[in-house]
Amino acid sequence: MTEGYELGAGTPQVLVVGAGPVGLTVAHELARRGVRVRLVDAADGPTPTSRAVATHARTLEIYDQMGVADAMTERGRRMQAFSMHRNGSQLVRLGAEYRATPTRFPFTLLLEQATTEEVLREAVADLGTDVEWGTRLDSLRQDGDVVEAVLRRKDGPAESVSTPWVVGCDGGHSTVRRLLKLPLIGDSTETWLIADAEVDMEAPQDSIHWIHVDGGTVMAVPFATPGKWRLLDTTVQSDSGRPDQVARRFSRKLTKGLGTRAQVRIPSWVSVFTIQQRMIQKMRVGRCFVAGDAAHVHSPASGQGLNTGIQEAFNLAWKLAMVIHGHAQYALLDSYSAERVPIGRDLLETTRKATRLVALKSALAAAAMPVVFAVVRRVPALRRRIEGKVIGRMSALRICYPDSPLTLPVTRQARRVAGPTPGERVTGFTAEGATDDPGWTAFVQELRDPRWTLLAFPDASGTATEPATSWLREAAERYGSWLSVRIVSRHVQPEAALPDPYAALTDRLGIREHVPVHPEAPSKTQTVPPGTQADGPLPDLYGTLADRLGIRKQGWLLIRPDAYLAARGDRLAADELSGALAALPIATSGPLPLRDAT
């Protein structure tokens, strides 16, 4: 609750405008953390068409934390190749190189946006929030304590709504952005044609196909449905709007470019659009935020729109929930723009380059392509380097926040070890590693907890000093509503009992078995009540978790709810642990006293 504003029991704590994938993600993550959400959309209902079709690895990691990854992957098609053709010949087929950016999801999931939204709507409904269709935002006004919004149903009266927070996820023509007077800065470039259609052709559906033909480019992106493709043409003519002519045009170009017969059926959807490369310079005005296309519009060349929006929604939701519950200072919200505006700026630059590459209207560059890719095919090291660079950019796995106000500097000792550094994601491991090793399996489950995580690594014998032991116990009791404290037990054989040093440590912490986050929520989907005991010890039976996270003798990691590392240390000491929390705009009840340390 905000000072000076009485929040009624049924009043929404957050009004989310826009029920696309970004708005649904915001609503889901707020509701998962016990925040009352009202979700409205001006449309009459879900759209049957899909602007986005590609979901990349970093977004799939987020879906896993949200608990919807399985539902998404079951309905999509895995794509792990990118094929380039020119005038009837295949120049190269590039694979998916994830060795430099390991992940449990080493692929792009081809899934229509309409299906993505369906999965998210079901998940949001399971948390008690439904979409109010046909409800548009007319106006909003805010002061220091509240936002006054006016909503209007189709053919209905206006409704005045008072709420502490508003999040605008209402797309490229955002009403929220307009009412906040946030200008989109940038330019528009060229006009492209998009069509969704069933196609009879020999091109494999495990790859995106880039086809240079007639001085321009055609792209074919497979859908999960067999035989259905998203087709894109970078050269647009006056007849591009008629479905029958669009089908004949793509049939001719695909046949010529691939060198085999292709028959395109009448498209189910055709769109001619001018590419916009624009963004806003801040994503928050007082108590109002924007995310996704409401904050930036850009070329679809690298399939980043939906993915960037999901990542922004997840970034914002956990921060806003912490402030609403009183677990963080308002300064935490400043980190949203600080972290995501630079990502949006970089996104516009990379999509601008991708647009030029896809269109490839330079005759000289087109003539050089067969020579260049002949070298790429014959030099495996060069090929892997190109594949890794493409994947690193497209997957968003290399996004990090080294300059964030939530990223704390590490000690000189910690800088020398392997493993993630503050500001980097901690999910850099493969699916095999996560399933074959009990430590990684437990760690993956821990990352699905909506709270922060403090991993404490005693030395190999399980020894921790009394000051650190007391601090961890008090941290679990005082901050358990937003912080999961886990003691990592190392070098224990699977058939052996927990060694006495670990037993003594967990006894002193009051840890018996794994304690659910909430008596009625063993799935860890609700907010943890204050005073919850520490969760049970996290097993690292072979020490691989400690090794890969860069822990030597002992240490600790403080992990954000979005699986980015905020801080780490190489001493399991009360002063280091307390200092880390005190340096962040969280733990509003204050840092724990260092009675035992002194």
Image (cartoon, rainbow, N blue to C red):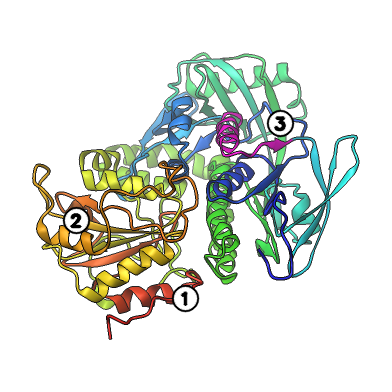
Q: Which residues are magenta?
A: 113-132
Q: Spot the residue most to the bottom.
A: 598
**On the picture, is 122 further left or further right than 131?**
left
Q: Which residue is mark 2?
A: 489
From the image, which quarter does the N terminus lie in? bottom right
Q: Which residue is mark 3?
A: 271
Placement of 536 over or under 1, stated as above or below = above
Residue 281 location in percent, x, y?
66, 64
Q: What is the CA distance from the residue labelled 1 to the residue labelled 2? A: 29 Å
In this rendered view, identify the residue nearer to me: 249 or 394.
394
Q: Is residue 319 visible?
A: yes
**On the picture, is 299 further left or further right than 508?**
right
Residue 595 location in percent, x, y?
32, 82
Placement of 350 over or under 3, stated as above or below = above
Task: Answer few, some or many: residues within 10 Å of disc 1's Cα (few below 14, many 20 plus, some between 14 and 19).
Answer: few
Q: Which residue is mark 1?
A: 590
Residue at image point 55% right, 23% down: 229
| Quarter of image, res 97 | top left
Residue at image point 89% right, 45% down: 158
Residue at image point 35% right, 55% down: 426
